[in-house]
Image (cartoon, rainbow, N blue to C red):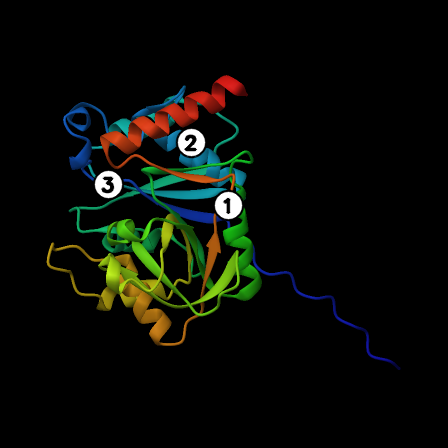
Amino acid sequence: MPERKQPEKEPNKIRTAVVPAAGKGTRMRPITYAVPKELLPLGSKPVIHWVLEELAGGGISDVVLVLSRDKTAVLDYLDRVADSSLPKNIRWVYQPEPRGLGDAVGCARNALEDAPFAVALGDCVIDSPKPGSAVGRLCEVAAQNNCSALLCEEVPRESVSKYGVLDPEEATRPVFKLRGVVEKPAADKAPSNLVIAARYVLNPAIFEYLDRTKADHTGEIQLTNAMSSMIRDGYTFFGVCLEPEEKRLDIGSHSSYFEAFETMVKRQTNA
């Protein structure tokens, strides 16, 4: 009797995301003395609303916010807003001290299952004609290749020292395997001008590597350093480029916030 062909197993879909939002917003002062930067308006909605809406559009249904204890205003906002376009399940954990992005992600460990998860920085929005499409592609690449994946964009070479920079193993675009990642290198030592665009999908092994990662000279635990160690130990990471019509909007400084505000107002006005 001939063997019955088994249907191909679909890759596990990534449904959970961590949103680090515990930073003090020092570069945005004095406004952040009064309002957390995640609640600053971008058009008719605050930053955090756009981030969560984007995640839901990318297939994320479960979100873990990482907050500082003085950011209860974020929870108050989410308690009051009723929007079916947001993820169905939003939980939160606290980061006791602001010890960097790696520490913030590590704080979510006990709230997650032992499965790959997305990370979306709470002070960056990916503007797109199709909200969530970048996150959706990132999750798809990670699931299909059983790997971690980093959203990326090209920046001028002189700006790379502000970012985590990718070291591509291949010249193919828009999806490519990584040889490494470097945290804020000098322009003349950067392996490329491709930088992480505030969105990640990570293997849960990242937590073991965060445990081993020492704080840098600023006292922060860098997520990029933990990812670099994973790659050296044989874990696969892919880069996924933003598409030409997509743009990362950063709320980290006054100038970038004003630019982001103008972009989102135009998008809403022309909708």
Query: Looking at the picture, how far across and down is residue 47, in whole percent?
Result: 35, 30
- Residue 143 visible from this viewpoint: yes
Quadrant in which residue 148 is drawn: bottom left
Residue 185 higher or lower than 79, as above or below: below
The residue at which mark 1 appears reads as: 134
Residue 1 higher or lower than 204, as above or below: below
Which disc is residue 22 wearing? 3
Query: Looking at the picture, how far across and down is residue 18, in whole percent?
Result: 37, 47
Which disc is residue 236 wearing? none
Dot in front, 1 or 2: 1
Residue 252 higher or lower than 111, as above or below: above
Q: Give the CA distance from mark 1 to mark 2.
A: 14 Å
Mark 2 vs 3, N-terminal side = 3
Few, some or many C-alpha atoms within 10 Å of disc 2 (few <14, some 14-19, many ≥20)? Answer: many
Residue beneath the point at 30% across and 56% down: 164
In screen coordinates, is 106 left or right of 199? left
